[in-house]
Amino acid sequence: MKRINNALISVFHKDGLGPIVEKLHDLGVTMYSTGGTQRFIQDLDLPVTAVESLTAYPSILDGRVKTLHPKVFGGILARREAGHLSELAQFEIPLFDLVIVDLYPFEKTVESSEEEDEIIEKIDIGGIALIRAAAKNYKDVVVVPSMEDYDYLLEIVDNEGAETSLDQRRHLAARAFAVSSHYDTAIFNWMKRGTEVSGWRWSYSPGTPLRYGENPHQSAEFYGDLEASFTQLNGKALSYNNLVDIDAAINLMSEFKDASPAFVVMKHTNACGVAIRPTVLEAWKAALAGDPVSAFGGILISNHPIDLATAQEIDKIFYEVLIAPGFDDDALDFLSKKSKRILLRLKDYSGNRRLAKALLKGTIVQDADGVSDGREDFKVVTKKSPSDREVEDMIFANACVKHLKSNAIALIKDQQLLGMGCGQTSRVDACRQAIDKASRMGFDLQGAVMASDAFFPFPDSIELAHQTGITAVVQPGGSIKDGLSIDYCDNNQLAMVFTGHRHFKH
């Protein structure tokens, strides 16, 4: 345990600071401070030493320089060993055991102002330096890097007095570098917006702050290089949910990147509309017909450039994001009239080869599902072989079902998604959901094909599909009861192929 004797306090937000400084005073801690924080402590009738009296320099340059001095940083960075301590004594520098900082509100200023001078003045220099110095020396120094950590410090002093453990100091040091990284990234993103340098591409965007996580009460950041995948041409800042859906949309469209014009409508990472047609406009109309209700607020992606006629049709619905490899000039001008509409020019269909997910206080990592089943992967297991048209639809169907949450079923006819069932706890429920969706959208399933992301443990789903007019089935196979499904198909003149590749997506 280490005792806190001297504290340096320099914060923007004072809310919640009062109980801390009162407790520190009661514990005999000497407090040093600057500017508004110093006045706040004095207004509480508590003793506080001005940093200026230590450094012999006043706050200068309109407050830009207050704490940047060896007598401040020496007291923070000194190791508690003979050599460092003798130097501190030589130069009359006090040790600092606690540093409390809350940075200038840069992000809130960016949100509320477009005045560059005002924003620039909210770039904290001294505060960032203080928290990084204190965090570096966490073995001896407690750092509180944000008002969000006031309660944690108060809990410590309430329970432990002026003593802190190494684990507590290390935890706060990690918090300090998280705060510093987030803050610097926000400045980086503001600085680079709108800048273009010939031959240069931003390749590093550490911890890009997002508007929020899946819900407004969750914070979120992106670590990586968004510019490698797309260029944002218009619209508001991307959110966590936007990025998750964009990733799902690009992954699905990668199955059709070399096809005739294809359009996909994504909602909550699942496709609710997919179609291939001779023109982009026809592909859009066919994809939208898959579920025009779910398309509201969705993510749209095309594998061909967007022309004006298609843009005008798309504009008839509300959507979050439109992604395409290009936009005709007049289409881009038309779509950009709505300033919040997110338009992305797609650069690269390839995603990460390795996928990670955080769970159980750790991370699991796997290879991406890079298998795309084609005609050569199909093994006909029934007496009846599928027609060429059915084979093409089964390839399309298998590409779609691969990107739906398990348990998943996709119903396809003429290169169009008619119905999908996804995220169900049984395969027969997924099948019922897909059939119901197709029926409600007014589609005729006669001659359609069905794809499943995993084997059918029983023939019940195939029986349901057959009753609606479906004539061909594609599935991985591998059940000990595959024979029951094969027999049902043979007895009812259905074609079925096995791929040998399961496509679970959890």
Image: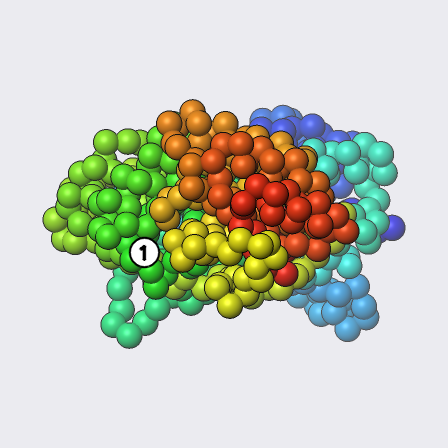
The x, y position of residue 479, in whole percent, is 73, 51
Q: Quadrant of residue 387?
A: bottom left
| Image colouring | rainbow
Residue at left offset 81%, top offset 68%: 81
Task: Report the side of 49 relative to 3 (left or right).
Answer: left
In front here: 12 or 381? 381
Residue at left offset 47%, top offset 29%: 437
Q: Is residue 2 above or below residue 336?
A: below
Work out which residue is located at the far left of the displayed protein and give it.
330
In front here: 53 or 245? 245
Number of labels in the image equals: 1
In front here: 474 or 502? 474
The x, y position of residue 422, in whole percent, is 56, 38
Residue at left offset 54%, top offset 62%: 378
Is disc 1 surrounded by few (<14), some (14 to 19) or many (20+) residues within 10 Å? Answer: many
Q: Secondary structure at mark 1?
A: loop
Residue at left offset 54%, top offset 45%: 493
Q: Quadrant of residue 460?
A: top right
Residue 331 visible (yes or no)? yes
Please name the amino acid that badge 1 sits on.
Asn
**Residue assigned mark 1:** 303
The x, y position of residue 335, in whole percent, is 20, 42
Task: Report the side of 275 relative to 425 (left or right).
Answer: left
Task: Report the side of 413 relative to 306 (left or right).
Answer: right
The x, y position of residue 477, in whole percent, is 66, 54
